[in-house]
Amino acid sequence: MEDENLEAIMGLIMHSGNAKSDAMEAIAAAKQGDFELAEQKIKDADASLVEAHHSQTGLLTKEAQGDHMSVTLLTVHSQDHLMTAIAFKDLAKEIIDLYRRVEEK
């Protein structure tokens, strides 16, 4: 595996992991009634997902240009991290909304 590809794959894993952690912290903040912090953590998660997508786009661009890479377990793992982080962030937003509704009543 080329160092450039490995760097992009590790970027996907790292930024996706950060996004998932931020989403989890957003839920914890909402649970405590700190909706301002919860919203900030969701914004942080979004920013990390943008960075993860940049890593992914680099790999996809190389592939589209004919520079095929072998699919390794690490490659699959990085994509799994990204998709899980996206789903987790979306779910966190819904949970925050539920906490907000409970707080209002």
Image (spheres, rainbow, N blue to C red):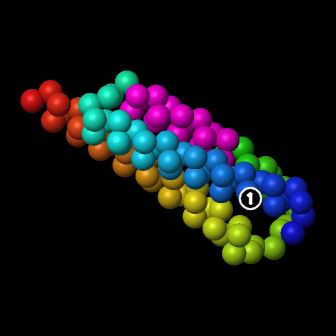
| Amino acid under disc 1 | Ile
Asked if residue 9 lies left or right of residue 1, the reply is left
Q: Is residue 58 above or below residue 26?
A: below
Residue 32 colored in magenta in the image: no
Do we see residue 20 in this rendering? yes
- In this view of the protein, which residue sits in the foreground, 39 or 57? 39
Picture residue at 49% right of the left edge, 42% below the top: 22
Residue 104 location, x and y as percent?
Answer: 15, 27
SS at mark 1 in the image: helix
Q: Quadrant of the C terminus?
A: top left
Picture quadrant of residue 82 = bottom right
Picture quadrant of residue 93 = top left
Residue 69 location, x and y as percent?
Answer: 83, 68
Question: Magenta stretch mostly in which secondary structure?
Answer: helix
Total numbered badges shown on the rendered structure:
1
Picture residue at 63% right of the left edge, 68% below the top: 77
Picture residue at 71% right of the left edge, 67% below the top: 75
Residue 6 location, x and y as percent?
Answer: 81, 61
Q: Which residues are magenta?
A: 37-52
Picture residue at 47% right of the left edge, 34% below the top: 41
Furthest toward the front, the residue is: 32
Q: Quadrant of the N terminus?
A: bottom right
